[in-house]
Image: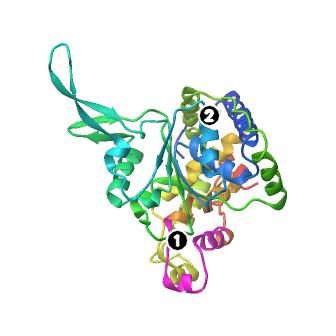
Amino acid sequence: MTQETPPDLAALAKLKSAQERIREQIRTVVIGQEEVVEQLLIAIFAGGHCILEGVPGLAKTLLVQTVARSLSLNFGRIQFTPDLMPADITGTEVLHEDRQTGTREFKFVHGPIFANILLADEINRTPPKTQAALLQGMQERQISAGNHHYKLPSPFFVLATQNPIEQEGTYPLPEAQLDRFIMKVIVGYPTKDEERKIYRAMTGAPPSDPTPVLSGEEVIELQNLIRRVPISDLLVDYTMNIVRATRKDDPESPEFVRNWVLWGVGPRGGQSMILAAKARAALYGRPEVTVEDLKAAAVPVLRHRIVLSYNAEAEGQSPDTVIRKLVDSMPVHASPTTSDPQVQRALK
């Protein structure tokens, strides 16, 4: 096993306390959606981008804005439309004239991507050329304009929204861009009791603004902390086995995968699954990853990385059902000779 500097227990306690306070702030504005909030916080503290899919009116935009305010982070928003150009995201160079000297020079005017949290609203409504401009920022944490490169602020997250019911006038995201999102979170309808509370809360006095819980510098520190959370070789192998089993050409993939899956998950999906599991463990103050952390991360991390076959669609299958079936059927095996204490604890 690769030797890692173990996380500081006091720092883990701080993170657990912070996430509880952040969720309290979010509850003052957004009612319900507890699982969505958890997955969104996991994505942020794991340092990844996240895509939220849900029908209109489920408070996706409000949730992202509230998270940004709770973390005292700079917030930017782009409403994606078919006529949006790359420069509308990244910014552009304009000719500036100095009135005193009369000299002219090009100066770069920053676009909305220069924010800590960027809300890409209805990201699938803009053409591939514009989506590619966002992809560079997501991948490289910098953008190019002319012959110059400009670094994006740190931390930097893209939280994108998609509407699953309107397909006319949309441009499906390329697989390369989808793979850059650590998670795809499904925002569902509220329960009956939650919906009643929403009607009361949203038609009365406006809620107060959330109180900032963490600064940008503290978020970066906690992201570094999460990467130091240890994971046993057993659970690395467990993750790898799940990811490899999604590929129909793998000799160990089950029969249902060969029938239902056209393209499986690449190595980045396994890395994302481990990072998300580390973040989940740390958010609850635990100093190591468990099997349950990986199982909880599997569906939101892998669902957008699987392409189903026509057979699966004809049978009414979804990526979620494929992943859950894999997770339920995948055993966690330890070598008979292993004495790693992390392995033993992971099996409990």
Region in magenta = 305-327
Query: In what element is the residue under mark 2?
Result: helix
Quick one: 258 or 333, which is closer to the camera?
258
Q: Amino acid at mark 1?
A: Thr
Q: Secondary structure at mark 1?
A: loop
Vertical relation: 12 (above or below) 121: above
Which residue sits at x=48%, y=38%? 156
Query: For mark 1, does the 10 Å Cα neighbourhood hold few (<14), some (14 to 19), or many (20 or more) residues?
Result: many
- Eye-nearest disc, 2 or 1: 2
Q: Residues within 10 Å of mark 2 (few under 14, many from 20)?
A: many
Whether 97 is among the magenta residues is no
185 and 8: which is toward the camera: 185
Considering the whole magenta stretch, tell me its main secondary structure.
helix
Q: Can you identify the residue that label 1 sits on?
A: 246
On the image, the x and y values in percent for residue 240 come to 53, 61
- Locate residue 63, reporting x and y percent: 64, 46
Left or right? Give the position of 291 relative to 180.
Answer: right
Residue annotated with mark 2: 69
Q: Is residue 91 left or right of residue 17?
A: left
Amino acid on which disc 2 is placed: Arg
Q: Which residue is at 68% across, 41% downward?
A: 283
Work out which quarter of the rendered image holds the C terminus and state it. bottom right
Q: Nearer the viewer, residue 94 or 204?
A: 204
Q: Earlier in the sequence, mark 2 or mark 1?
A: 2
Establish if 288 lies above or below 53: above
Q: Nearer the viewer, residue 340 or 161?
A: 161
Name which quarter of the figure residue 324 lies in.
bottom right
- Judge left or right: residue 217 versus residue 170: right
